[in-house]
Image (cartoon, rainbow, N blue to C red):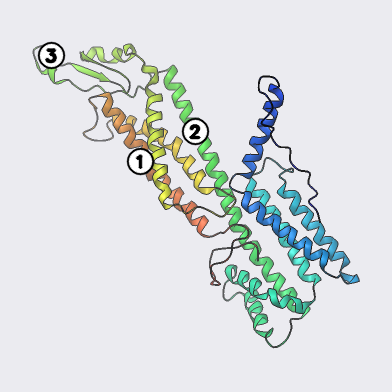
């Protein structure tokens, strides 16, 4: 059966931006959408597409009994649904991983129907793969797994019956459902992390905007006493901010000196940029513990994005805690360089909070493999392969 979906229009790089700006912009947007849909999932999409083509070829070359014609139509309908979901034409607002999971569900449904179409003795060569999938997901004492294993042992003496095939299909469906549940948990985790990252990014931008328009309300500045103040002139202080400073001030002059400093509107912006850079370094160093993922949900990228706004906010909040005397002995920094240095430390320290999210993401990835992944062993465990 041929691919019924029309080829997607491609971006024509020969369109001139100056002569046809509207067409150029439309083509660019279309190409960006295509790249977004294919990012990190093109290989998995082709795995499912190859499975669809394989089943279509088997269906066309298989001689059908008159009583199996309805099942053949149902198999074709499932394959058409799987191919349509791969096109991303319906529900384009959903993640690419959701489309791949739905396409995999329809492909698995077509495989179950095809098992019902063929003669029971023809299921014997497929038993090793089906039993391996059941062992991956179901517990050792699960009655469905025990039944499938017994059928596998009995096929050495006799061919399976139609009742045996139905028992195998039931166990395989449960195994695939458990594997799908693990993949859905990964997808939900990615969506939650992205939403939290967006919320933290909005808060970081809001802090920077408020700090720009109201720089003297809660200034991230310190007022250490200068050593020269020990002379006859009395005690003097220095106002130190992230971007500027002034010295030789008396105690009564300190509050008003902050408003007179140059570029005080950029104090919070500078701190957030420094914290973001430190968090980016922390995210890069965390890559050594990431082995990648075979799922269509890009968990490592989502975790890396979470660190950036978190680092910007922890840099600001950490210095405000120091300014409030929360850290003993560090209530008054002496220079702008010290403030920037501590902002780097606090920005990098976001790893203290996000490491728990990293561990949760790695635990979810350890319990699931992507569509078409082969099982490394037949031992029962949380790892799941959804094909079978």
Q: Is residue 17 above or below residue 112?
A: above
* Nearer to us: label 3 or label 2: 2
Distance between the Cα atoms at labels 3 and 1? 40 Å
Does 368 sit above or below residue 324? below
Residue farthest along the front direction in this orientation? 14
Q: Is residue 120 above or below residue 58?
A: below
Tag 3 and tag 2, C-beta contact below 8 Å? no
Q: CA separation, marks 3 and 2? A: 46 Å
Which residue is found at the position 67% from the left and 68% from the top? 172
Are circles 1 and 2 on residues that touch, CB within 8 Å? no
The residue at which mark 3 appears reads as: 234
Residue positioned most to the right? 66
Looking at the rendered structure, which numbered label has been put on residue 201?
Answer: 2
Q: Quadrant of residue 121?
A: bottom right
Left or right: residue 156 compared with residue 368: right
The crowd level at tag 3 (other Cα within 10 Å; few <14, some 14-19, many 20+) is few
Camera-side mark, 3 or 1: 1
Q: Residues within 10 Å of mark 1 (few under 14, many from 20)?
A: many
Label 2 residue SS: helix
Between disc 1 and disc 2, whose residue precedes? 2
- SS under mark 1: loop
Direction from residue 59 to residue 368 in the image, left or right: left
Numbered circles on residues, count? 3
Per the model, the C-alpha gap separating discs 1 and 2 is 17 Å
Image position of 91 with respect to 360: above or below = above
- x then y, percent, for residue 300: 49, 47
Position of the C terminus by quadrant: bottom right
Residue identified by numbered label 1: 349
Examine the rendering and report whether any part of residue 324 can be seen: no
Q: Residue at x 51, y 38 (%)?
A: 197
Whichever of callouts 3 and 1 sits on the residue coming sooner in the sequence is 3
């Amino acid at each position: 059966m041929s691919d019924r979906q029309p080829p997607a229009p491609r971006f024509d790089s020969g369109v001139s931006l100056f002569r046809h700006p509207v067409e150029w912009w439309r083509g660019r947007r279309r190409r960006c959408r295509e790249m977004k849909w294919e990012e990190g999932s093109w290989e998995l999409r082709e795995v499912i597409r190859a499975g669809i083509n394989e089943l279509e070829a088997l269906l066309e070359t298989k001689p059908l009994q008159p009583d199996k014609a309805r099942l053949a139509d149902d198999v074709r309908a499932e394959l058409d649904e799987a191919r349509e979901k791969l096109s991303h034409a319906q529900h384009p607002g959903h993640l690419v991983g959701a489309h791949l999971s739905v396409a995999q569900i329809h492909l698995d449904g077509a495989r179950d129907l095809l098992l019902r179409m063929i003669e029971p003795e023809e299921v014997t060569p497929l038993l090793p793969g089906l039993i391996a999938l059941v062992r991956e997901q179901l517990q050792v004492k699960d009655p469905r797994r025990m039944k499938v294993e017994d059928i596998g042992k009995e096929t050495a003496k006799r061919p399976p019956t139609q009742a045996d095939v139905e028992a195998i299909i039931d166990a395989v469906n449960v195994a695939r459902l458990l594997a799908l549940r693990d993949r859905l948990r990964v997808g939900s985790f990615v969506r939650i992390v992205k939403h939290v990252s967006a919320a933290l990014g909005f808060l970081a931008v809001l802090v920077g905007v408020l700090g720009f328009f109201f720089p003297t309300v809660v200034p991230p500045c310190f007022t250490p006493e200068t050593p020269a103040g020990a002379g006859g002139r009395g005690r003097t202080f220095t106002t130190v901010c992230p971007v500027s400073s002034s010295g030789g001030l008396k105690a009564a002059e300190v509050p008003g000196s902050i408003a007179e400093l140059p570029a005080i509107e950029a104090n919070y912006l500078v701190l957030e940029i420094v914290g973001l850079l430190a968090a980016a370094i922390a995210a890069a160093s965390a890559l050594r513990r990431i082995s990648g993922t075979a799922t269509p949900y890009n968990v490592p990228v989502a975790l890396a994005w979470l660190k950036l706004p978190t680092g910007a906010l922890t840099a600001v909040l950490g210095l405000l805690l120091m300014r409030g005397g929360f850290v003993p002995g560090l209530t008054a920094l002496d220079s702008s360089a010290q403030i920037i240095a501590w902002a780097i430390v606090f920005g990098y320290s976001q790893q203290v909070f996000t490491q728990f999210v990293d561990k949760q993401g790695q635990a979810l990835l350890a319990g699931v493999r992507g569509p078409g992944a082969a099982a490394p062993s037949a031992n029962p465990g949380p790892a799941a392969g959804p094909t079978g």
